Amino acid sequence: MFSTLNARLADVGVETATIGFFSWLGITYSIKVFWAPVVDRLKLPLLDRLLGKRRSWIILAQTGIATGLYLMAQVDATAAPEMMALCGLLVAFSSATQDVAIDAYRIEIAEERLQAALAATYIFGYRLALLVAGAGALYLAEFWSWQVSYEVMAALVGVGMLTVLIVREPTVNHFAAAQDIAHKIEQEAAKRAHLNPRVARAVGWFYAAVAGPFVDFFRRYRELAVLILVMVAVYRISDIAMGVMANPFYLDFMGFSKTQVADVTKIFGFFMTIAGSGGWCDGGPLRRAENPAAGRHHDRRNQLAVRSAGPVPARHRHSGGGGQCR
């Protein structure tokens, strides 16, 4: 969504500095850990009764994604960039929430020996979705318009929603699996007996279900806890902030058409990613990738893109008066 959005913004003439700010929408995927406990514990009214805990959250997230994409199709990015950013935030937040719910569903739907196959299938589906939302959106924008492109993407979310309605809910006794949390809720509520019983239980639930996992995390890792959280949060910041500027670079700076960008970066890049993944699964490179230092790969890739650009044309430089790019 973000690379396509930035391509659209560059195509309609939005300033490069503004496009860079839009890239921060991607940070939602790094901080989804903060609301993941809510997704894991909270039952949605009505939807939970109809679909179950996991499927109800997935449907809600997909509804947010489809709504955000449709609204983005109707917004003029040059006239109302703030509204476009809000719609993009809705899509980003909903998409990150969907990731949390799907991960929980995948873990609970099958036994442990099938988890590797499920994870591989999930990643393959993710790559196919990137292909459709990347190359497909660019083709539609080239031959029709960006509005049609986003409306089609919003409609395609229906494929995922239909799938959720067809598949079964995991047969997991969530109450039995979370008896420790239920007991902690009662304990925390008892400590707040001076409050209204419903308020006391709500506060106890928040402490046990939301704050509890973080408290447990800090108890386990002690002085390393903050360092681990910081590493998780900033691991891909360079890629989020700069990597998503690739499409504006190709379209605006290098002068390629949307079709050319789709052919090379999306179609060709998709098959090279799938082919190259085999070389990373043979053991050696994978072990090195698990090292935190592997994060330098993202930064080096971005540096290579900068060096390959050559001299910056005058129209892309900052003006002497401190004006923005473009």
Image (cartoon, rainbow, N blue to C red):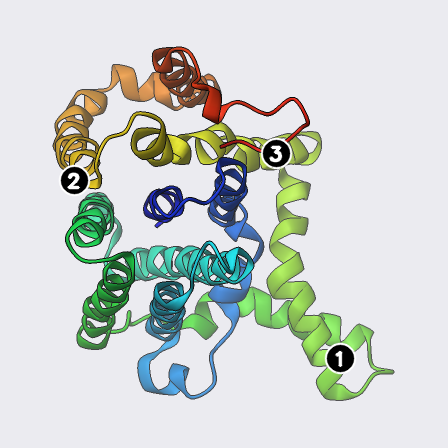
Give the SS element for disc 2. helix
Residue at coordinates 54% horizontally, 42% vertically from top-left?
21
CB under 8 Å between callouts 3 and 1? no
Across and down, in percent, residue 51 comes to 32, 81
**Label 3: few (<14), some or many (≥20) within 10 Å?**
few
For disc 2, the marked residue is 259
Q: Is residue 200 left or right of residue 209?
A: right
Disc 3 element: helix
Task: Give the vertical position of 292 relative to 115 (above or below).
Answer: above
Report the amino acid beneath label 1.
Ala
Q: Which of the two marks, 3 or 1, is nearer to us in this view?
A: 3
Residue 263, given in percent of the width and then of the height, sits at 13, 35
Q: Earlier in the sequence, mark 2 or mark 3?
A: 3
Q: Earlier in the sequence, mark 1 or mark 2?
A: 1
Q: Nearer the viewer, mark 2 or mark 3?
A: 2
Q: Is residue 80 left or right of residue 305?
A: right
